[in-house]
Amino acid sequence: MSELARPFKMALPSFAQHLDVLENCGLVRSRKSGRVRTYQLAPQAMKPAEHWLVAQRALWERRLDSLDDFLRAEKESKR
């Protein structure tokens, strides 16, 4: 855990709380060996978020394409 926390400017107990949240959500797994706690990513837990993001991206691309079409038409009509 200390190695993971090193790049962040936060106290180790605070960092541990963040890792606990990630573990409770199933995004990471941990195991303890003596005084050392090792964390491992659980990328399969990100699949639902990934699918949602893909759907949101498609939605916003369609909306922005529609806005682009509208703005181009407005510009052409003012010529």
Image: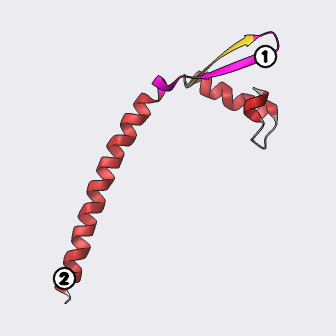
Q: How is the image coloured?
A: secondary structure
Disc 1 secondary structure class: strand
- Locate residue 27: give its quadrant: top right
Q: Residue at x 23, y 75 (%)?
A: 72
Quadrant housing the C terminus:
bottom left
- Range covered by the magenta-colored residues: 33-45
Name above or below for residue 21 compared with residue 57. Answer: above
Disc 2 secondary structure class: helix
Residue 26, given in percent of the width and then of the height, sits at 54, 22
Q: Residues within 10 Å of mark 1 (few under 14, many from 20)?
A: few
Q: Which residue is mark 1?
A: 36
Name above or below for residue 56 compared with residue 44. Answer: below
Q: Which residue is mark 2?
A: 76
Q: Residue at x 30, y 48 (%)?
A: 58
User: Is 37 one of the magenta-colored residues?
Assistant: yes
Q: Residue at x 73, y 12 (%)?
A: 32
Quadrant housing the N terminus:
top right
Q: Which mark is residue 52?
A: none
- Locate residue 47: give its quadrant: top left
Are circles 2 and 1 on residues that touch, CB within 8 Å?
Answer: no
- The amino acid marked with disc number 2 is Glu
Residue 4, given in percent of the width and then of the height, sits at 72, 31
Residue 59, given in percent of the width and then of the height, sits at 30, 50
- Locate residue 8: give its quadrant: top right
Q: Of callouts 2 and 1, which one flags the residue occurring earlier in the amino acid sequence?
A: 1
Residue nearer the viewer, 33 or 51: 33
Name above or below for residue 72 compared with residue 63. Answer: below
Left or right side of 72 for 46? right
Q: Residue at x 28, y 58 (%)?
A: 63
Q: Residues within 10 Å of mark 2 (few under 14, many from 20)?
A: few
Rounded to the nearest angstrom, the CA distance separating label 2 from label 1 is 66 Å
